[in-house]
Amino acid sequence: MQEKPYFCPNCRSNRIKFSIISSYSQRFLKDAITGTVQQVTEPEAIEGQEPTIQCLVCQFTGNELRFIKQAEREPRESTSINTIY
C-alpha cells in the first residue's frame, strides 16, 4: 500500500474512509471418499498483487492505482487556519 492520498473515483466525496482487501492462499487435503478435510496449512498472503481498495462510503472496489490517480487529478487544497485573538 502506497503512502499517497486516495479519492474515490465513484462517489467523488470520500478521501479518508477505505478498506484494503487482501488475497490469501491456504492449502488443504481432503479425503476422496468422505470429503472431510484431513490437513490444513496456515494461510499465506499472495505477494506481487496490487492491493484492492474499497471505499467505505459507496462500497466501490478497485485497484489502488485508480484511487491514487483520481486524487492526483483532483488534489485537495490544504487550508491553513489563521486564528485571530
Image (tube, rainbow, N blue to C red):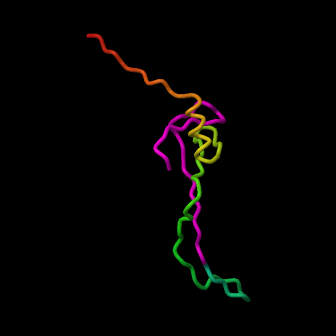
Q: Can you name the residue that lies furthest to the right here? A: 33
Q: What's the magenta bit mostly, secondary-structure-wise?
A: loop
Q: Quadrant of the C terminus?
A: top left
Does 8 sit above or below residue 83? Answer: below
Tell me if residue 17 is in the magenta stretch: yes
Q: In the rendered view, does 23 fall on the left or right side of 84?
A: right
Q: In the rendered view, does 56 fall on the left or right side of 35?
A: left
Q: Which of 19 and 9 is in front in this view?
A: 9
Q: Where is residue 2 in the image (x, y as percent from the top left)?
A: 49, 47
Q: Nearer the viewer, residue 50 or 82?
A: 50
> In the figure, residue 9 lies in which quadrant?
top right
Q: Position of residue 6 (x, y in %)?
A: 54, 38
Which residue shows up at 59% across the image and 41% down it?
A: 55
Does 62 sit above or below residue 38? Answer: above
Q: Give the range drawn in magenta.
A: 1-27
Which residue shows up at 60% across the image and 76% down it?
A: 27
Does 83 sit above or below residue 16? Answer: above
Q: Which of 35 and 69 is in front in this view?
A: 69
Which residue shows up at 60% across the image and 46% down it?
A: 54
Q: Where is residue 5 in the image (x, y as percent from the top left)?
A: 50, 37
